[in-house]
Amino acid sequence: MKKVLDEAGVNEQTDALCSASKQPFYNSSPFVLKDLTSRTTAQALKRDFIKYLDGFSSNAITILEKFKFRSQIETMIDADILGAVIEKFVTPTINLSPYPVLTQTGAVQTPGLDNHTMGIVFEELIRKFNEENNEEAGEHFTPRDVVDANLTDTEQIPLTYAGGICAFIQKEVLPYAPDAWVNENKTQIGYEISFTKHFYKPVKLRKLSEIIADIRELEAETDGLLEEILKS
C-alpha cells in the first residue's frame, strides 16, 4: 500500500495505511520484526532495526520517544542482547498482541492481551526493575497514558437497558471494538435533566396592537432623520 500511494503521489497517507494494517497505527518499513532475526552481524541488526522503527506511524513513534526507546538500542547492542530480545517478541509462545494465536485446527494456542491487561503487565515490569531505586510503577509514563488518550470514548447507556452496562458493552460495543473495556473509575450514573423543560419560562407574547404602537412611535422619533443624514 505504501508503494502504491508513493507511486500515485499521495502525500497524506495515514488513513489509507491504517486501513491497510487494520489498526490505528502502521509500519511502512520493508521489514516485519521476524525478518530481523536473520541478521548475522550486530551492525546490520542495528541498522535494520532502526529502519524498522522509523517505519512506524507518528502516533506509535510518539510512544517510542516517550520511553526514550532509541537510547536503549546501543546498550542492547553492546550487551549483545538485541537479537535475543527480538526473538522473544516473535516467538509463538509469547503473545503480546490483542489477538489470540491459533493452532492449525483453530484452537487457541496463546490468548491475546487486551489494553488493560497489557498496561498491568507493563506496570508490573516497571515495578519489578525499579525496586532498587525505591520508585513506584505509578511514577512512570505508561502505555495507557499515551494510547492516548487517542482511543478513549464515552457511551451513554440508558438506566433501563436490560442487563445494564455489561450487557450494553457486550451487545453494542464489542462487536465493533473487540478489545474495548470499561474504566470503572470513570463510570458515572445519573439522570440527564432537560434544562429547557425544567427551567425555561416562556414569555407571554405581546398583543399585536402594542407592537404596532411601538413601531409607530419609532417612526415618529425618526421622522426626518433620514433626510438630515442625506443632506449631511
Image (tube, rainbow, N blue to C red):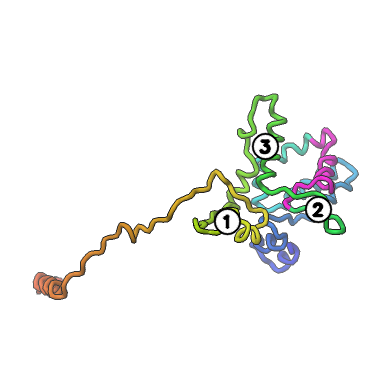
Q: Nearer the viewer, mark 1 or mark 3?
A: 1
Marker disc for residue 163: 1
Picture coordinates of residue 16, whole percent (x, y):
67, 64
Q: Is residue 15 magenta?
A: no
The answer to whether residue 69 is above or below residue 192 is above
Q: Earlier in the sequence, mark 2 or mark 3?
A: 2
In the image: residue 122, left or right of residue 229? right
Quadrant of residue 43 in the image?
top right
Q: For the point 85% across and 51% down, which residue is it?
A: 35
Q: Residue furthest right?
A: 40
Please give the residue where the numbered disc 3 appears in the rendered image: 123
Q: For the point 68% across and 44% down, which residue is it?
A: 117
Dot 1: element: loop
Residue toward you, 195 or 26: 195
Q: Residues within 10 Å of mark 2 (few under 14, many from 20)?
A: few
Picture coordinates of residue 44, whole percent (x, y):
85, 45
In the image: residue 142, left or right of residue 36? left
The answer to whether residue 211 is above or below residue 78 is below
Please give the residue where the numbered disc 2 appears in the rendered image: 108
**Residue 71 visible in the displayed image:** yes
Q: Which corner quadrant holds the N terminus? A: bottom right
Disc 3 marks which amino acid?
Answer: Glu
Image: magenta residue range: 76-98
Picture coordinates of residue 41, whole percent (x, y):
89, 42
Q: For the point 62% across and 50% down, which residue is it?
A: 181
Q: Earlier in the sequence, mark 1 or mark 3?
A: 3
Q: Residues within 10 Å of mark 1 (few under 14, many from 20)?
A: few
Quadrant of residue 128 in the image?
top right
Dot 3: element: helix
